[in-house]
Image: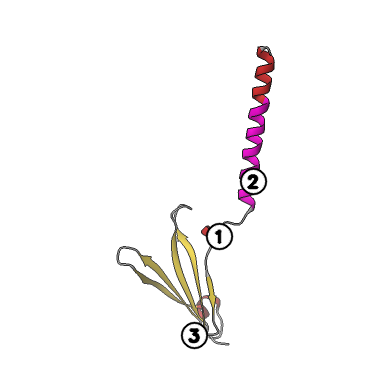
Amino acid sequence: MNRTQTACIALLASAFVLAAILIVQIDRKAQPNTAQADGQNIYLQTFQMMTARTRGDGTKGEESLFILDNSSGVLLVYAPNVGRKQIDPVTAIKLADVFGGGGGGR
């Protein structure tokens, strides 16, 4: 084999390796990643709870807890306090005041 044939074989082999890497990356993007879920939801008749990312750069986000009391129509927001190993209340919002509704409950 001369130099041109060797270079062509090397380029062809690297093209196959790059194509394989591309296929693997596309397959990873297509599969759902359960470790990075957007939040968890719990629904009961009297209240709903949800966690959601509220702060962060995308890799180290802060997850806050939102509790909606269906009977009183109040949204409670809690933020984690990692240093104390607890969650601290942030705010309580009456949804009737925000949306102009006529009270809570079903």
The numbered mark at residue 49 is none
Side of 18 relative to 73 (left or right):
right
Side of 13 relative to 35 (left or right):
right
Query: What residue did someone put label 1 on?
Result: 34
- Residue 32's spot in the image, x, y percent? 60, 57
Classify mark 3: helix, strand or loop. Answer: loop
Q: How many marks?
A: 3
Q: What range is drawn magenta here?
A: 12-30
Side of 88 relative to 15 (left or right):
left
- Residue 8's spot in the image, x, y percent? 68, 20
Q: Residues within 10 Å of mark 1 (few under 14, many from 20)?
A: few
Inspect the image, locate mark 1, and give the three-letter code of the amino acid beneath it. Thr
From this viewpoint, which residue is outermost toward the left?
Answer: 84
Q: Quadrant of residue 12?
A: top right
Q: CA distance from mark 1 to mark 3?
A: 34 Å
Query: What residue did someone put label 2 on?
Result: 26
- Residue 4's spot in the image, x, y percent? 68, 14
Classify mark 1: helix, strand or loop. Answer: helix
Inspect the image, locate mark 3, and give the three-letter code of the amino acid beneath it. Ser
Magenta stretch encompasses residue 27:
yes
**Residue depicted at 54% across the width and 61% down the height:** 37
Q: Residues within 10 Å of mark 3 (few under 14, many from 20)?
A: some
Query: What residue did someone put label 3 on?
Result: 72
User: For the residues carrying marks 2 and 3, which lies nearer the camera in this image?
Assistant: 2
Q: Is residue 68 above or below residue 7?
A: below
From this viewpoint, which residue is outermost toward the front?
Answer: 1
Q: CA distance from mark 2 to mark 3?
A: 47 Å
